[in-house]
């Protein structure tokens, strides 16, 4: 027992306590008396390290660390930064680090089925915009000449924003989510989808999406995937080895 390693703890406020053995540290961590970012060192080695990095505390403190990170990411400034840079965060779950080499390509039937759901949602949105413009026309807020331009503008913006915003924030549309498929960057380490890539993907899909079956048959990917260097993959629980 006399040779058991002992540890000193230094909190974020600079307070130090100890020495404590491993069992005592574990109990302190479980009771919340040690935070993940508190410093810990052995009494034999004058080198501090974060408590969460110690193997016997890692599992206990990692949840605390992740909650703190998520709390910080939900703050106003991080939110503004993400909106200003218009980027989507890389997926962090164990079964969803979406690399092109990790998941199989989504089949054409899955793509078409997802597209049907998305087109229904887009069509419903367009009908709502049509109803809104009709109401504005009846209320004499819009004239017969201007209502056509407003209807076309709002309808086109809705069609573009539906796909672009969802791909930027979720890497998948509602239809794609239903069938478990994602749009990811076609490179070894995956990476973030930015708004410009998602916008051109959406625009090209509307213009040339009808040729998707032909491009998939010839090149293995649709034209919008080739243009934006993306890939549509299917999530199958865990990445294939």
Image (spheres, rainbow, N blue to C red):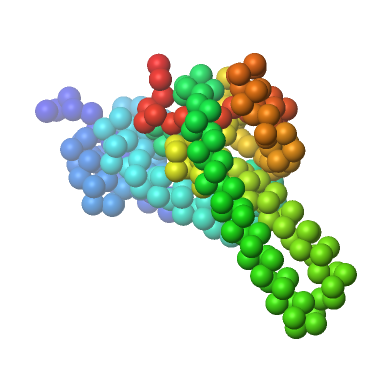
Q: Where 236 sits versus 119, above or below?
A: above
Residue at (28, 52) in percent of width and height? 32
Which quarter of the rendered picture does the C terminus lie within?
top left
Asked if residue 47 lies left or right of residue 228, the reply is: left
Residue at (69, 46) in percent of width and height? 85
- Along the line of sight, the residue nearer the viewer: 62 or 57: 62
Residue 188: give x, y in percent of width and height: 58, 19
- Along the line of sight, the residue nearer the viewer: 177 or 121: 121
Which quarter of the rendered picture does the N terminus lie within?
top left
Residue at (65, 23) in percent of width and height? 214
Can residue 137 be seen at all in this image of the molecule?
yes
The residue sitting at the right extreme is: 145
Quarter location, residue 222: top right
Residue at (23, 52) in percent of width and height? 31
Q: How many marks?
A: 0
Residue 133: give x, y in percent of width and height: 73, 71
- Along the line of sight, the residue nearer the viewer: 70 or 133: 133
Asked if residue 147 lies left or right of residue 220, the reply is: right
Q: Where 42 sits versus 20, above or below?
A: above
Residue 5: give x, y in percent of width and height: 23, 29
Can residue 90 be seen at all in this image of the molecule?
no
Q: Where 197 sits versus 130, above or below?
A: above
């Amino acid at each position: 027992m006399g040779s058991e390693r002992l540890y000193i703890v230094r909190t974020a406020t600079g307070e130090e306590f100890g020495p404590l053995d491993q069992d005592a540290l574990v109990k302190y961590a479980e009771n919340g008396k040690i935070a993940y970012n508190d410093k810990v060192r052995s009494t034999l080695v004058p080198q501090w390290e974060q408590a969460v990095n110690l193997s016997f505390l890692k599992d206990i403190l990692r949840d605390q660390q992740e909650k703190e990170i998520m709390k910080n990411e939900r703050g106003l400034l991080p939110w503004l930064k993400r909106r200003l840079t218009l980027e989507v965060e890389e997926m962090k779950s164990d079964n969803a680090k979406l690399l092109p080499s990790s998941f199989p390509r989504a089949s054409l039937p899955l793509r078409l089925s997802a597209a049907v759901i998305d087109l229904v949602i887009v069509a419903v949105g367009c009908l709502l915009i049509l109803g809104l413009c009709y109401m504005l026309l009846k209320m004499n807020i819009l004239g017969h000449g201007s209502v056509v331009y407003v209807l076309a503008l709002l309808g086109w913006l809705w069609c573009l924003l539906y796909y672009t915003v969802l791909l930027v924030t979720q890497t998948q549309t509602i239809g794609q989510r239903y069938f478990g498929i994602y749009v990811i960057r076609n490179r070894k380490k995956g990476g973030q989808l930015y708004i410009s890539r998602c916008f051109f993907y959406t625009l090209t899909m509307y213009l040339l999406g009808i040729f998707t079956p032909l491009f998939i048959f010839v090149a293995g990917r649709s034209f919008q995937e080739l243009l934006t260097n993306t890939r549509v993959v299917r999530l199958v629980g865990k990445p294939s080895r």
